[in-house]
Structure formats: C-alpha cells, structure tokens
Amino acid sequence: MKLKTMCTGKNFQTAQEKSKLFCWYEREIHLSYTIGPIKAEWLSLHPKPEVVQFYDIITDRVMDSLRYFAYDNATRDGIIEENDPVVSPLERQIIFAFPDPETNKESMYVSQLTERITGLKLVNKTGGVPLRLTGYGPGGHRGKHLDAPSGTFMIYINDVKKGGETTFLTAGVSALPIKGSAVFWYNVFTDGTADKSVDHGGCPIVFGEKWVAVRWILNDWRDHLKCDLMPQTPYEILVNGKSKYK
C-alpha cells in the first residue's frame, strides 16, 4: 500500500529529515572529477538508509548504444537461458539484456564509471552479472524487494514520459528516472548482513518506457572496505572524501 501511495507522488520524509538533505559537486572521488565535478544530491540520510543520486554522468551515445543492444538481445527472463528467443520490448512489460564487458565496450565503460563514482573496486572482478539492462513497457513495474549484492548502482538511460520512479519505502522518498543520472545505495551493513531498510520498488510506467542499466557490487568484492566493530553499522557514502557526520 505504501509503495502505491508513493507512486502517486507522496513523500513520507519528515521536515527534519528533509532539512538535512543537500546537493554538492563531487570532486574528490576520482582525479577525473577535479576539473569537471559531478552533481550529486542526497535523497536520504542516516538514520534512514543513505541514497544518493548523481546527475549527467554518462553521454547520450553510450546510453543509446546500451538501449540498442537491449532491443536486439532482449529476453523476458532475469537470467538468459540458452536458445531464448529475441523479443520486442513492445511485447513484454519487463525485459532484460546482459551485455558482456569482454565484447561490449559500453558495458565495460559502465563498470569503469561505477568504480570511479563509488570508489569501489569492481572492474575485472569475476562472478555475478556484469551489467543488467532492464526495460519497462507501459504498466511495467517492480514490487517491494531487497537487492542481494552489497551495493546497487542504477543508471537511468532514457527519459520516461510519466511514471517509473524508484521508491525507497523505509526512507520514504522516490528517485525520479532522469536520463543520464544514477542512484547508488548499499544493501548490506559492514558486517555483511542485509540492511532491510533499503527496501525499494519501481513505480508503474504510465506513458512511454523506462530503461535502466544496473551494476551490482557483489559481496565478495568488499575486501577493500573497512568493517566496523559494531554489528549492523551502515556504510557511509562520503562527500568529497569526508564524513557528513563529523
């Protein structure tokens, strides 16, 4: 019920929670952003789950190439089965495609981009799905769920005419599907246990279609991150290399 209400535009954040949110230009996460910083905005902050949206991070050429690949290599199943037929996005509400970074340079670029922006090490890592492209037709949506990997980096690669917001139910806020932007959040605590407060879903597409490129950060790739001594301590996403809470 809460997801359906949020999909009508309802925001459940308190005035105090909203007052702590802010935007900034990220310059420190990677040398390439020292001259050309990226725009970032907090959608949710501690004690609710941290959710950040980055803007204008990827070119139209790369986004178009990813969508064309998805159109040509679509499957309705979340995992590709051998001999799956190619389907048209207009024939299904939700479809998937999985470009291989070894043969698809745009897929490798998304991995490199995710690594630059998050600071996490994932290029050339093995195991898991390198990149998942997901297309939603009219009415297509995702119910409330939790992601299993440690972190999720999701890029919106087209403009949605209406609908398609990503709702974070415990946080009480929705991310707008703005083309060229990406939403990033952690799904686990530093001790590896699931953070159930990052439950989220995808609102139905009212008009048009929605395409996202999802790059997951797997649990086995967290070996370079610090583990807090206190159990169920959330990871913190830094602002220009500094903590927001000190």
Image (spheres, rainbow, N blue to C red):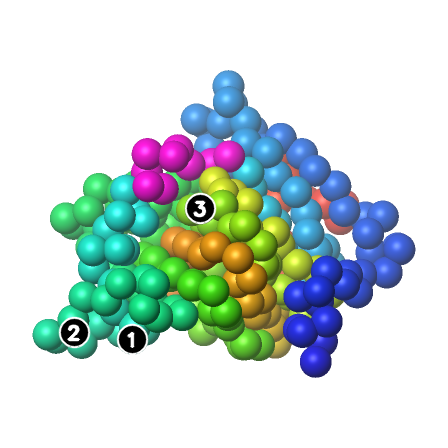
Residue 44 in view: yes
- Label 3 Cα crowd, 10 Å radius (few <14 / some 14-19 / many 20+): some
Which amino acid is tagged 1?
Asp
Residue 208: x and y in percent read 48, 55
Q: Is residue 57 magenta?
A: yes
How far apart are labels 3 and 1 at the CA level?
A: 21 Å
Residue 59: x and y in percent read 39, 33
The stretch of residues the image draws in magenta is 56-64
Quadrant in which the C terminus appears: top right
Looking at the image, tell me whether mark 1 or mark 2 is earlier in sequence order: 1
Q: Which is nearer the eye, 246 or 106?
A: 106
Question: What secondary structure is found at the residue carrying circle 2?
Answer: loop
Position of residue 11 in the picture relative to residue 202 (left or right)? right
Q: Which mark is residue 158?
A: 3
The reply to whether dot 1 and dot 2 touch (C-beta < 8 Å) is: yes
Residue located 55% across and 38% down the image:
55
Q: Which mark is residue 84?
A: 2
How far apart are labels 1 and 2 at the CA level?
A: 9 Å
Which amino acid is tagged 3?
Asn
Q: Is 197 above or below relative to 27?
A: below
Residue under numbered circle 1: 77
Which of the 4 quarters of the picture holds residue 241?
A: top right
Residue 32: x and y in percent read 43, 26
Looking at the image, tell me whether mark 3 or mark 2 is earlier in sequence order: 2
Q: Is 100 above or below relative to 139?
A: above
Residue 128 in view: no
